[in-house]
Image: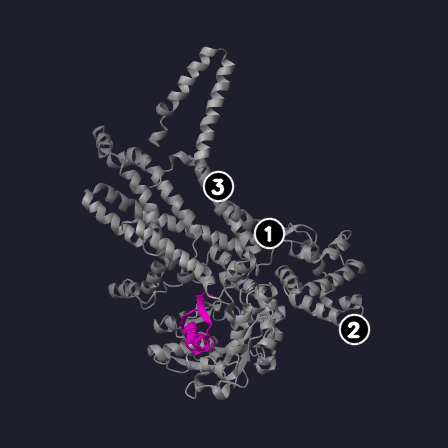
Amino acid sequence: MKITRARLFAFAAATAFITSGHTAFADELSIMASGGAWQDAQRKAWFEPFSKETGIKIVEQEYLGDLGKVKAMVDTGNVPIDLVTVETATVLQGCDAGILERLDYSKIAPREKFIEGSALDCGVGLDAYGDILAYDPNVLKEAPTSVLDIFDTTKFPGKRAMRKFPAQNLEWALMADGVAPADVYEVLATPEGVDRAFKKLDTIKKDIVWWDAGAQPPQLLASKEVVMTTAWNGRIQNAIDKDGAPFKIVWNNQILEYDMIAIPKGAKSPDLAYKYLAYISQPEINAKLASYITYGPVRTDAASFVAPDALPKLPNAPDHMTAYLVADTEFWGDYGEDLVKRFNAWLAQ
Amino acid sequence: MSALEPTKLDRPRASRDWSAADSGTAKSVAAALRRADLGDRLRSLALAAPLLVLLALSFGIPIILLLSRAVYDPTIANALPQTSQALRGWNGTGLPDDAAFLALAADLRSNQAKGTAYELAKSLNARLPGARSQVLKTVRQLEAAERPPLEVMKAVPFWSAPSTWPVIESGTHSVTSFYLLSALDLRWNADGGIERVPPEQAIFVQVFMRTFFVAAAVTLATLILGFPLAYLIASVPKGLAAILIVAVLLPFWTSILVRTAAWTVLLQKFGLVNDLLLWLGVADDRLDLMYSRIGLIIAMTHIQLPFTLLPIYSVMRTIQPSQMKAAYSLGAKPFTAFRRVYLPQVFPGVMAGCLLTFILCLGYYITPALIGGASDQLISNFIASYVNVELNWEMAAALSFILLVFTLALFGIFARILGLDRLKLV
């Protein structure tokens, strides 16, 4: 390609336009979310209706969900985003590290209207998702009845996939070893409890394939690399609904977690950010996401607004709440770093 | 290299020599020579200055700043000024006196007032697992002020545990060896000596060894594949050579992520490679090529092949076929001719290619994450995890520092053995 002067000018003008674009409009809200089917759902359920209603333009960005990027923005004092979606475990970390704003709930919604654990100091819940077990009934002749069946290699031989992260796996290991769900975090807080969990994981270690990204579990099932896998329920449901995959979800002993949204320290338009948080925290709006991806609302009074056909697929649908555990963010805030290190050492051995 | 031949550059210097000699003593000759040399050097430095400044600003300084985090962590010292003062006279064994407890209580309260209690808790937690919740709990109780501060402090068993105060004491020094030692699976013990961490926590030494092993294996594999291929490309007619070079380069122009993803398609359990092996009857059952060391080495070898091959090829191209013929005509057997005439000339290219591949392999990150199993993660995966996920940049800096030192040491050894001027890149 020949670079002509006209072309160079066009390029320079385009660059200038792009770089100035962020400050050109006063009412602009920049949201960074972790992409994929989940961000698409947020766009349809929340971004677009919000823009229509308020005239505030939403600029979307994507990231991998790792707070390192946000930390770098805050540390250098150049924060081009006003809102960022985070996992519950990372909200606490970001809060402690001083990179997320402590929220003023008087500008959002009454805090007691949220499901317990979904309205934190630095992050407000967006939706509830389940860590579940998924399998392909064409491969497994006998259906697993609980997530804990992943530890039963005699009844269900073959490779199984788990997330390469201590959270959830250690909890399931203890429950499979006979600890009551209510006592899991108490036991896991002791060195003996941690040893016990790792010992249980040892029994299936050679059969485990580890996944990192949420898109991997459906792929691992589809390629028959594994006979069963732990997963986030929305990703599996997405494969079933959109790709026609024959997978089945096992809800028994699921672990419930919340997706969060937070304001990074030094955000340029915190007022608009609060406006958005208040908007999506209304019960009827909060319930709308479920129509686009099977993650449930976090307002206690939102269930009646969920579309009837979406309700049975949600992790916090009554049918799925017979045996479950709610992830303890405080616990992972305290012990996370140490357990991750121990887990990595265990993996490497 | 030919630009550095002595004749051209030395001529002006020689003429200056003459003029200096005319004017008088040998001393002034030497001085004039030095002046002239200095002028030359300054001129070339001035020419290179923009590049050097750019390098320093965009590369050198950020790296030094980041690596300095490995040894400089003032968070705890800044957060606990009174405690630092109170611990000055403490001998480091047993519990410090009540003054230290009171100082810590005062510091905790002032951190709560400034809103930095969480940051302090996190920083302490990195060195002393479980400290986070204890700090926050104590802060809350101190805030409530139902009891005198000393009683509150004594009531929380954590503050009277033997392991707590040495950690706090070491935290009050901004310059710390904690992270560098951790990166080598070492720690200070209670007697002030250095000891290995317990085996269930030891991890990094093993990962460093693994990283070097994988890098060496990939380097060897690319050499075994690349050397004959480079020879082939160098010896076939030009047109065919161009086609072969494009075949080598084509994957080189594809993103590393795409190539890695392509290998997952090929290597998976019901993938092409397994299908082929079964069909050929080589394997009885489907092999676990994905999430294994062997799969990782295969994929990395493919990605690194051009890096090893191109320097070798560029050297081979310069070797005249007539030299081998001359060796035969002088009575050398083919292998002798290869060993004594061909190999010594190709050697710099081989070393350059291998060095390039080896050092690049040390930093591999995406491929081990996607194709390697849990026990195939390399040191970069851990560095990335500390930077992005755990937000412990001090630990990431320490690991990077150790990796950099090892890499530079290897490079130094290599340069010593071969001499850097003999390196021939593309």
Note whether B393 is above or below A343 in the view shown. Answer: above
Local packing at callout 2 (Cα closer than 10 Å; few below 14, some 14-19, many 20+) is few
Callouts 3 and 2 in the same chain? yes
The x, y position of residue A336, in whole percent, is 57, 67
Viewer can see residue A171:
no
User: Residue beneath label 1, please?
Assistant: B181
Circle on res. B121: none
Mark 1 closeness class: few <14, some 14–19, many ≥20 residues within 10 Å: many
- As helix, strand or loop, the secondary structure at mark 3 comes to helix
Magenta residues span A35-64
Q: Are marks 1 and 2 on the same chain?
A: yes
Badge 1 amino acid? Leu
Q: Is residue A60 magenta?
A: yes
**Residue type pointed to by label 2:** Glu
* Quarter of the view holding residue B10: top left
Q: Chain of mark 1?
A: B
Residue B53, numbered circle? 3
Is the residue under label 2 in contact with that under label 1 (CB below 8 Å)?
no
Mark 1 or mark 3, which is nearer the start of the sequence? 3
Q: Which residue is mark 2?
A: B146
